[in-house]
Image (spheres, rainbow, N blue to C red):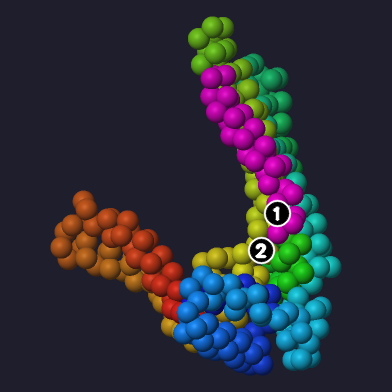
Amino acid sequence: MKTIKNYLDSLFLNVPKTPETEKAKEDLLSNMEDHYYELINEGKSEQEAIGTVISEFGSIDELLAELELDKEQRKDNEFLDAIGLEEAFEFWATVRRFALVVSLGILSFCFALSGVVFANYGSIISVLAVIFFFVLVAIGVGLIVPNGMKYSKAFELLEDRPLTQRTRTKASEKLKDYEKSFRYGLTVGIGLCILAIPCIIFFDELFGLTILGTSLFFSIAGIGIFLIVYTSIIYDGFKKMTENNYFISDEDEPGPRATKDTYGENAPFFNFFRRIYWPAIVVIYFLGSSIMGAWSYSWLIFVLAGPIYSFIMERGQNDKEDEEQ
């Protein structure tokens, strides 16, 4: 019986949840179950009965046509403010621009540190090193701050809006296509960060050039961080449109509709719980530690609080799924 239900769930996966489609799904499940028991009573084995029921099931397109839901309508959400492909491509372009400028900004900070280590190399070099440092820091700030504001604005425009099925499908395709670049960028970036460490030891031990080794350390590590940050931001931009039915910029604070989609009728409780949980843990920590004088081990409350929080939130999702079943 579970096989039949899972089969129906997969068929209705991309179908908008409306009273009509939910009723049609329930009726189909009831009819298929009845037919299954009839076949069992006729002497069929469980596997034979399931195979016969599924093979005799008609096309879901015919059913949805009867409900006046054409194929294009099924692929999209029923909300007027749903995020379509055009808006998704604009968002991904914004993400790419932000990924580039913020990575360049961080690289600029690293190069600034790379140059300022020469500040003790004579008066002229010291002045140039300090000027070089402040110029690169200013460039980094100029790249990150204004583009960060634009990036945040792009998230605000999409926050808590539903994603059409076509958008989620395209996002999945983009994510899959980018996975190889993400892996390479992450691997090379981490490798450069690790390889930057021996630079200090190498130049210090063999040539006594500690400052040069330190400068190279910041430069090589900066390039590694550039690759990690750049590829990670782009990857996350695609991923945000594949995981949920609604766009969520911050997983710790999803919007009202996204919360309701995740937790169903219990959404108000979980909204309230999410807001008060960690402040309450902090209050309990300080009060308990002060009253009981247990500062040496009271910090363990934070170690326990994380898994408890995750368990409660996941339990809420499971309860909602059980209600739908």
Q: Does the magenta stretch include residue 39?
A: no
Which residue: 61% across, 87% down? 28
Residues in magenta, as a range: 172-200
Q: Does the magenta stretch include residue 197?
A: yes
Q: Name the residue under label 2.
A: 242
Q: What residue type is labelled 2?
A: Thr
Q: Relative to 282, is 136 above or below?
A: above
Q: Name the residue under label 1.
A: 175
Q: In which quarter of the image is residue 30?
A: bottom right
Q: Main secondary structure of the magenta part?
A: helix
Which residue: 51% across, 16% down? 201
Q: Quadrant of residue 257?
A: bottom right
* CA–CA distance in space, label 1 to label 2: 8 Å
Q: Relative to 21, is 173 above or below?
A: above
Task: Verify CB contact (< 8 Å) between mark 1 and mark 2.
Answer: yes
Mark 1 vs 2, N-terminal side: 1
Where is residue 21? Give x, y as percent.
Answer: 66, 88
